[in-house]
Image: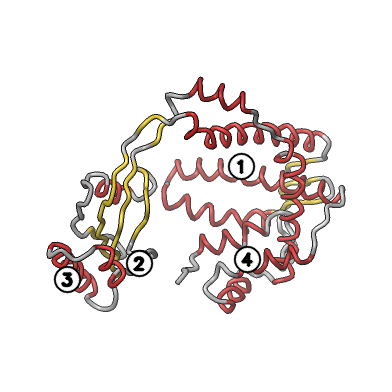
Amino acid sequence: MMRCNAAFICAVLFSLTVISGVFVRPAAADNKILVVVNDDVITEQDLSVGFNQIVADLQKEYSGNELKAKTEEARKEYLNQMIEDKLILQEAKRRGVIVDESEIEDRFKEVKSKFPSEEVFYSEVQKAGLSTEVLKKRYKDNIMMGRLVSHEVKDKVVVTPFEIEQYYKEHSQELISPEAVRIRTIMLRYEGKESEALTKQKADDIMRLIKEGRDFGELAKLYSQGIRSEEGGDFGFVEKGQMREDFDNVIFNLKEGEVSAPLKTDTGYFIFKVEEKRQSKPLSMAEARDDIENIIYRQKAQKRYEEWMAKLKRDAFIQIK
């Protein structure tokens, strides 16, 4: 079942409510105005709604002066993004971008489906000091903004075959299929009192069955508590860096068909099996074409967005307090 931690809640609720700075709770009388953007304002309260989670994440990795510097840098970037969001939304409203009610309802249902149940969803909305009406208004704003950005940026970017071929000639040595391994995993969670010892015993029992010749995939279906248990623990191909460092250190040192010893973590024990290894190799033009097209597209789209945003800022009244 899906867990609703703070980062997840922030991602599906808060990040969709910072566009225009309008929330269910009115701003306090002493709520400081940070920026004036044409006829709109961004307040300290508006900033804190989404930024608090960013600070919490930074505190997990940094401390002291480094944390202070990283927080200040992130605050500037986040505030700039809020300014840009306001400009985009204002421009979308000025141009009369239309959003159908069914689109808003679809987005609302999509977000709600990311929670374990409707009860949990509405509970988290209430805890956040929001309402469904405010959320739907924010989703409408997001759809309007996305539609305008698509019209002004995405739909106007074209990548030609010549550009793809030229990029391949200039960057062929960088276009490499990385080393990867196809893995299966059995995950055993700690449960109840003295669970660590019991879970370790269960992991050892499974290892004994594997050594006796039992199929790893079948054992994963029977005993694994991981998300891919029904597929026999099959995670497909993973590249270095896609998993935790301690996992990488284990799986990339296994041979094809080899099974790891149980690996202890904070949540339980993991057993890995490498089904297949894929060595690093240069990509052919045909293999690299889609990746190259995406790279060029992103570069062009970013440049076009920056030019468009620069014009919106030049034509706007922006006052940072």
The amino acid beneath tag 4 is Glu
Tell me the mark number nearer the camera, choosing from 3 and 2.
2
Q: What crowding class fits label 4: few (fewer than 14 Cα within 10 Å), some (14-19), or many (20 or more)?
A: few
Q: Nearer the viewer, residue 206 or 231?
A: 231
Report the Cα–Cα distance between label 3 and label 4.
41 Å
Which element is circle 1 on? helix
Tell me the mark number nearer the camera, choosing from 4 and 1.
4
Q: Please identify the quadrant where the C terminus is shown.
A: top right
Q: Please identify the quadrant where the N terminus is shown.
A: bottom left
Q: What crowding class fits label 3: few (fewer than 14 Cα within 10 Å), some (14-19), or many (20 or more)?
A: few
Q: Could you tell me residue 261's position as x and y percent? A: 18, 57
Q: Which residue is mark 2?
A: 229
Q: Which residue is mark 1?
A: 77
**Which of the 4 image quadrants contains residue 141?**
bottom right
Q: Nearer the viewer, residue 86 or 199?
A: 199
Which element is circle 4 on? helix
Report the Cα–Cα distance between label 4 and label 1.
28 Å
Tell me the mark number nearer the camera, choosing from 3 and 4.
4
Report the Cα–Cα distance between label 3 and label 2.
20 Å
Tell me which numbered mark, 3 or 2, is placed earlier along the sequence: 3
Tell me which numbered mark, 4 or 2, is placed earlier along the sequence: 4
Q: Could you tell me residue 269's position as x and y percent? A: 25, 63
Point 31% across, 53% down: residue: 183
Tell me which numbered mark, 3 or 1, is placed earlier along the sequence: 1
Tell me which numbered mark, 3 or 4, is placed earlier along the sequence: 4
Point 47% across, 49% down: residue: 58
